[in-house]
Image: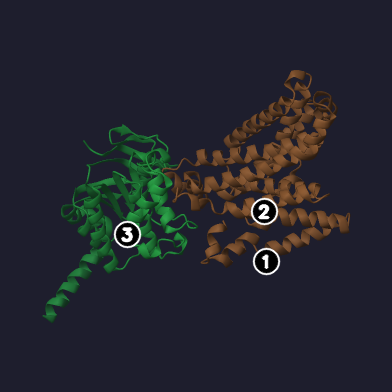
Chain colours: A brown, B green
C-alpha cells in the first residue's frame, strides 16, 4: 500500500477542482448551468486526452464517439419507452447502447485508421465521421436527417417530475462522474504497463515492437477507453439532457476542435491539463458570449493563438516545469 | 541443440539481394561476431532475426521454434533482445523507465509488475554504470551513454540471445576496449548468447569473439574461429581489395626504400 499510494497523488488536485466546481454549482443559485458547461468541456478534454496524450495520435474524428453515444441514448429511449415496466431502466439501456455503438466504431476505426500515422490518421478519422453522418442521413436509418425527437416519449414513460430532475440535475451530474472517471483511468493507465508501452510506442513504434510491445493492442485499449468516455458524455449531456438528436447537430468537427483547444490550452498529455483548459475555455467562452454576444469567436481565436505560442506545453506544462524539484511536484502530472 | 538456427535466409528488396542464402547456428552461451564491410547485409540479417523483415526464403528457428513469420513483438518474450546501430531510446522517458520497459515486455512479461520492473531496471542500470543518470531523460544522454542504456534495456528483457548492432561504432580505442571487456562480462554473468555486429573495427572483433562470420555482398564468406577467419585471404580481399600491379609495385618500392634505410 505504501508503495502504490503516492502514485495516485496527482489525482488530488483534479478531484479537488471537480468537487469545488460541483459544490459551487450545487449551492450557489443560478450557477448550475455554467458549472455543467465547464464540466462538459473538462470531461471531453480529459477523455480525448487519454488517447492523444498517451499515443500522440490526434483524433480529429473524436466527435463520432460523442455523436454515437447520443444516438445510443436516443435509440434506447425512443424504442424502449413504450415498455412501461422498464421505468428508469430505459436510461440504462440507452447507456449500454451508447457504449456498444462506441465500441463498435472504436474497433472498426482502430482496425482501419490506427495503422496510419500522423496526418493520415487524422484525415481518416474525419472521413469516418463524415461518412457516418451521411450514411445516417442517406440511408434514412435512425430517423435519417430529421433525427429523433423523444422528449415527449421520455415524459410519458417516466413522468414530468422525474424527467425534469433527470435533465436538469442527473444528466449534468453524470458528466462530472465521467470526468472524474476519465481522470482516474488516465492516471491508472499512466502508472501501469499500458502507459509504459504507449510511451515507447509514441517515441519509437518500431523499436517498441522489437522490445516486445504489441503496439496495436495498447493503442486500441487507449482508443476504446477514450471512445467509451466520449460516448458517455454524449449520451448524458446531449442524449438525455436535450431529448432530441439530429445528425447535422452531433457529427460536427467543431466539437473535436473544442476538445483539442481545451487540451492544448491546459497541456497535452498531462492529467490536470484538461481541467485547467476546460475551465479557461469554458469560462472565457461563457463570459465573452455575455459581454460581446456574436463577437466571441473573433476575440477568442487570437487569445488561443497567443496562449499556444507563448506556452506550447500548456498552462500545466509550464506549471510542471516551475514546480520541478519542489515538494509540490508529485501532485502535478 | 542450437539456440538460433538460420537456414538459407534470403531477403530481397526489389532486385537487390540484401541477404543471400545465409545459414548460421549459434549455441547457448556463445559469443559470435558478424563482420563485413558496409552494405554486406549484416543489418538486414539482424532485422530478419528480430522480426522487422520477413525473409523471402529460408527459416529462422529460435529455441526449437520456427519464428520466421512471427511478428517482432512476439519474439521478445521468447528471449530475443537487441540493440540498435543508432541508439533508439524512448527519449521523453527517463533512463529508469526505458530499462523498465525492457523488463516489462521481455521474457518476464507475464510475471512482473511495474514495480518489479523498476527494481530490475535499477539492477541493470547499476550493471552498465549509469546510476548517476537514473532519472535523467534518456534523450539527454551522450551517445555512449545511450548505447549503454540500450544494453541495459535489452538485458532487462532477460533474453537468451542478445543481438548487438554495432555496439562500438564511433567510440575511441579506450572505450572500445572497455566495451569489449564489458560485453564478455555480461555474457558470463547473464549466461546469454550474443551476436555482435562489427563493421570494421578489427581491434574489437579480435578481442571479443571466439568465432566470427564474415559477410560480403549479402552472402556468407567465412564462418570460422576469429584468428583463422581474419587471416583468410578472401577476408583480406574484401576489406583491402585485390592487389593491383600498381600496388604491388608500390609495396616493392616501399620495401626497397626501407631496406636502404637500414
- Can you tell which of label 1 and label 2 is closer to the viewer? 2
Which residue does the image show at 31% across and 32% down from the upper left? Answer: B65
Q: Which residue is mark 1?
A: A310
Instruction: Estimate how packed mark 3 is, as few (under 14), some (14 to 19) or many (20 or more) residues with alpha carbons within 10 Å.
Output: few
- Residue B104 in the image: x percent, y percent? 40, 45
Which residue does the image show at 65% across and 61% down from the upper left? Answer: A315
Q: Is the same chain shared between marks 1 and 2?
A: yes
Q: CA distance from mark 1 to mark 2?
A: 25 Å
Foreground residue, B116 or B227?
Answer: B116
On what subunit does the disc labeled 2 rest? A
Tell me the SS state at disc 2. helix
Instruction: Estimate how packed mark 1 is, as few (under 14), some (14 to 19) or many (20 or more) residues with alpha carbons within 10 Å.
Output: few
On what subunit does the disc labeled 1 rest? A
The image quadrant of residue B171 is: bottom left
Quadrant where the image shows the C terminus of chain A: bottom right
- Residue A8 in the image: x percent, y percent? 53, 51
User: Does the residue at mark 1 contact the one at mark 3 (Cβ under 8 Å)?
Assistant: no
- Residue B6 in the image: x percent, y percent? 29, 38
Instruction: Estimate how packed mark 2 is, as few (under 14), some (14 to 19) or many (20 or more) residues with alpha carbons within 10 Å.
Output: some
* Nearer-N-terminus badge (1/2): 2
Q: Which mark is residue A17?
A: 2
**B21 relative to A226 in the view: left or right:** left
User: Does the residue at mark 1 contact the one at mark 2 (Cβ under 8 Å)?
Assistant: no
Foreground residue, B130 or A105?
Answer: B130
Q: Which residue is mark 3?
A: B126
- Residue A158 in the image: x percent, y percent? 80, 26
The image quadrant of residue B60 is: top left
- Can you tell which of label 3 and label 2 is closer to the viewer? 2
Amino acid at each position: 500500500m505504501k508503495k502504490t499510494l503516492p502514485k495516485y497523488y496527482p489525482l488530488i488536485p483534479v478531484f479537488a477542482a471537480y468537487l469545488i466546481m460541483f459544490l459551487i454549482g450545487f449551492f450557489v443559485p443560478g450557477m448550475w448551468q455554467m458549472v455543467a458547461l465547464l464540466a462538459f468541456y473538462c470531461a471531453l478534454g480529459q477523455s480525448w486526452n487519454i488517447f492523444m496524450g498517451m499515443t500522440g495520435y490526434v483524433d480529429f474524428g473524436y466527435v463520432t464517439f460523442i455523436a454515437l453515444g447520443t444516438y445510443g441514448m436516443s435509440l434506447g429511449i425512443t424504442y424502449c419507452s413504450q415498455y412501461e415496466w422498464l421505468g428508469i431502466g430505459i436510461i440504462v439501456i440507452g447507456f449500454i447502447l451508447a457504449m456498444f455503438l462506441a465500441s463498435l466504431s472504436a474497433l472498426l476505426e482502430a482496425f482501419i485508421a490506427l495503422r496510419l500515422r500522423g496526418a493520415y490518421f487524422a484525415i481518416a478519422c474525419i472521413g469516418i465521421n463524415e461518412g457516418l453522418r451521411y450514411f445516417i442521413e442517406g440511408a434514412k436509418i435512425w430517423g435519417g436527417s430529421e433525427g429523433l425527437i423523444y422528449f415527449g416519449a421520455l415524459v410519458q414513460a417516466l413522468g414530468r417530475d422525474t424527467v425534469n430532475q433527470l435533465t436538469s440535475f442527473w444528466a449534468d451530474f453524470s458528466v462530472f462522474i465521467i470526468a472524474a472517471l476519465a481522470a482516474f483511468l488516465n492516471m491508472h493507465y499512466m502508472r501501469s504497463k499500458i502507459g509504459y508501452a504507449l510511451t515507447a510506442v509514441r517515441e519509437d513504434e518500431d523499436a517498441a515492437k522489437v522490445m516486445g510491445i504489441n503496439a496495436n493492442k495498447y493503442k486500441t485499449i487507449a482508443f476504446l477507453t477514450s471512445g467509451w468516455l466520449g460516448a458517455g458524455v454524449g449520451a448524458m449531456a446531449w442524449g438525455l439532457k436535450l431529448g432530441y438528436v439530429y445528425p447535422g447537430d452531433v457529427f460536427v468537427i467543431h466539437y473535436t476542435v473544442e476538445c483539442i483547444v481545451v487540451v492544448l490550452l491546459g497541456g497535452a498529455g498531462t492529467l490536470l491539463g484538461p481541467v485547467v483548459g476546460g475551465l479557461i475555455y469554458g469560462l472565457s467562452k461563457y463570459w465573452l458570449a455575455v459581454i460581446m454576444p456574436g463577437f466571441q469567436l473573433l476575440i477568442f481565436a487570437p487569445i488561443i493563438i497567443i496562449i499556444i505560442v507563448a506556452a506550447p506545453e500548456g498552462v500545466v506544462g509550464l506549471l510542471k516545469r516551475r514546480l520541478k524539484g519542489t515538494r509540490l511536484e508529485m501532485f502535478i502530472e | 541443440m542450437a539456440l538460433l538456427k538460420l537456414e538459407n535466409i534470403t531477403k530481397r528488396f526489389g532486385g537487390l539481394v540484401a541477404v543471400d542464402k545465409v545459414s548460421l547456428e549459434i549455441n547457448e552461451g556463445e559469443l559470435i561476431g558478424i563482420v563485413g564491410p558496409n552494405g554486406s547485409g549484416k543489418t538486414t540479417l539482424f532485422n530478419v532475426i528480430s522480426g522487422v523483415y520477413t525473409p523471402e526464403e529460408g527459416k529462422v528457428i529460435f529455441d526449437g521454434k520456427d519464428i520466421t513469420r512471427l511478428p517482432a513483438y512476439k519474439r521478445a518474450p521468447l528471449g530475443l533482445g537487441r540493440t540498435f546501430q543508432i541508439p533508439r531510446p524512448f527519449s521523453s522517458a527517463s533512463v529508469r523507465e526505458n530499462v523498465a520497459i525492457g523488463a516489462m515486455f521481455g521474457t518476464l512479461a507475464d510475471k512482473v509488475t511495474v514495480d518489479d520492473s523498476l527494481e530490475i531496471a535499477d539492477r541493470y542500470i547499476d550493471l552498465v554504470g549509469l546510476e548517476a543518470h537514473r532519472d535523467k531523460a534518456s534523450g539527454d544522454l551522450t551517445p555512449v551513454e545511450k548505447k549503454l542504456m540500450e544494453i541495459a534495456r535489452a538485458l532487462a528483457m532477460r533474453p537468451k540471445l542478445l543481438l548487438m548492432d554495432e555496439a562500438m561504432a564511433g567510440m575511441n580505442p579506450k572505450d572500445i576496449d572497455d566495451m569489449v571487456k564489458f560485453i564478455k562480462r555480461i555474457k558470463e554473468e547473464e549466461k546469454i548468447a550474443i551476436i555482435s555486429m562489427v563493421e570494421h573495427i578489427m581491434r574489437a572483433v579480435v578481442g571479443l569473439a571466439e568465432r566470427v562470420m564474415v559477410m560480403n555482398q549479402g552472402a556468407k564468406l567465412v564462418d570460422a574461429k576469429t584468428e583463422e577467419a581474419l587471416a583468410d585471404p578472401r577476408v583480406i580481399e574484401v576489406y583491402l581489395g585485390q592487389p593491383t600491379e600498381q600496388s604491388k609495385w608500390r609495396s616493392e618500392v616501399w620495401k626497397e626504400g626501407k631496406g636502404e634505410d637500414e
